[in-house]
Image: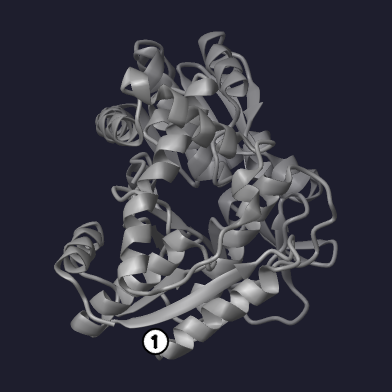
Amino acid sequence: MFLTSDSKSLRDQVRALLPGDLSRRLGVAVSGGGDSVALLDLLAGIAATEGVSLFVATVDHGLRPDSADEAAGVADLARRLNLPHETLRWEGWDGSGNLQDQARRARYRLLTEWAERNGVEAIALGHTADDQAETVLMRLARAAGVNGLAGMPAQRIENGILLLRPLLGITRARLREHLRERDLSWVEDPSNQDLRYDRIKARDALAHLEPLGITTNTLVRVAQNMAQARDALDRYTQETARTLVRIDAGDVLLDRNGFLALPDEISRRLLVGIVGWIGGAGYPPRSSAVQQAVKAVQDNAPAVLGGCLLLPSGGVVRFCREYNAVRDVTAMPGEAWDRRWVVKGPEIQGLSVRALGEEGLRQLPDWRVTGRPRAALAGTPAVWKGDELLAAPVAGFAAEWSADLVAGSEEFFTSLLSH
């Protein structure tokens, strides 16, 4: 197969949307559909030119009879390109919850676990300009704000792995032209014609909106404009946080009066950012819950949001981990506990790291000397041997033990930026 000038132009367009310093070990997720097959072909050329090792993965959700054959087809294509391939199978779904959402979460979990096993630092995904336009349209239907209308980001971190979307400016039609030029085949997922799914409804609606000038390219530009607005708001939020926030042993202390003087959009973003850094849910709380938490700050009242407690005291609101969110979380000393803390000390058999809780506080008559509220200390890490408390570093009972945050104060401020 030869590379036409149009194909080379398309490859250059994809390369421009990838990081300048491309990972030496790059992954690509390929389903067998036209978008991901085109992405694989384009990346194979880029990788060969730049000395990058390319790894291919296919997630088989097992939801259609043909899915295994489609994964085998991708494996065959990867073999012809002399690239390593692995099929990742989703198993264990109990039938509960939203199928598409569960499948999406499983897909990213399987891909990032695969990347970690193979030393792959970044994974390229085949989302196109059409996918972006459909996303914006669906979010518009849900009255989304700036972040929602910014669509899918070109880059984001998931479970420590960089996800890349270098096709967001390229349409499906253009990618299929490329596949025909390269004599490459692909499969069509029959669910792409199923109007029971919101995305397919959005795809159908776009065809009828074109006479109004609402096209794929228009909605992609909307997403780009909203992404610029989001980035500006994030920067304002970060700068505001540096003046209003102090970190205290993993808790966030917020100046209440300064918070109340903020524009609504910035106060909401700051609150969501704080809760995300402490709670680590990976997705923001519901808008209604955020509004209730904002009102609690305004009323100087306690609240719970996203696995966090909001505890007002004087002119400060303390955001801390809620004990109920971590009461069943355990780790070994030296491992990350609640993905936030690493507790280290003497090597003693039979120890575990668990939340301090009320049981631990009863064994600590001097916890008040820390100056921290009882409810805040309950959600901090402690070292246990069975029911015996050996150490609680954040609560002032440490002996030879230490508890260090995985991500410190500066990482909190960095986390307020969407990208």
Residue located at (72% from left, 57% from top):
329
Residue located at (47% from left, 82% from top):
77
Q: Nearer the viewer, residue 77 or 329?
A: 77
Q: Where is residue 266, by image quadrant?
A: top left
Residue located at (33% from left, 41% from top):
417
The colour mode here is one colour
Q: Position of residue 334 (x, y in %)?
A: 58, 73
Q: Nearer the viewer, residue 90 or 77?
A: 77
Q: Nearer the viewer, residue 376 or 148?
A: 148
Quadrant in the picture for the N terminus: bottom left
Relative to 52, is 161 on the left or the right? right
Relative to 140, is 60 on the left or the right? right
Q: Circle 1 sits on which residue?
A: 81
Q: Position of residue 224 (x, y in %)?
A: 27, 35
Instruction: Relative to 262, say whether 361 is above or below.
Output: below
Please name the amino acid that badge 1 sits on: Leu
Relative to 27, is 293 on the left or the right? right
Marker count (numbered): 1
Q: What is the crowding at mark 1: few (fewer than 14 residues within 10 Å), some, or many (at least 20)?
A: few
Instruction: Relative to 49, say whether 314 is above or below.
Output: above
Asked whether residue 128 is in view, the answer is yes
Relative to 321, is 221 on the left or the right? left
For mark 1, give the secondary structure. Answer: loop
Q: Position of residue 313 (x, y in %)?
A: 54, 20
Q: Position of residue 229 (x, y in %)?
A: 27, 28
Instruction: Relative to 71, say whether 202 is above or below.
Output: above
Q: Nearer the viewer, residue 266 or 375?
A: 266
Asked whether residue 401 is in view, the answer is no
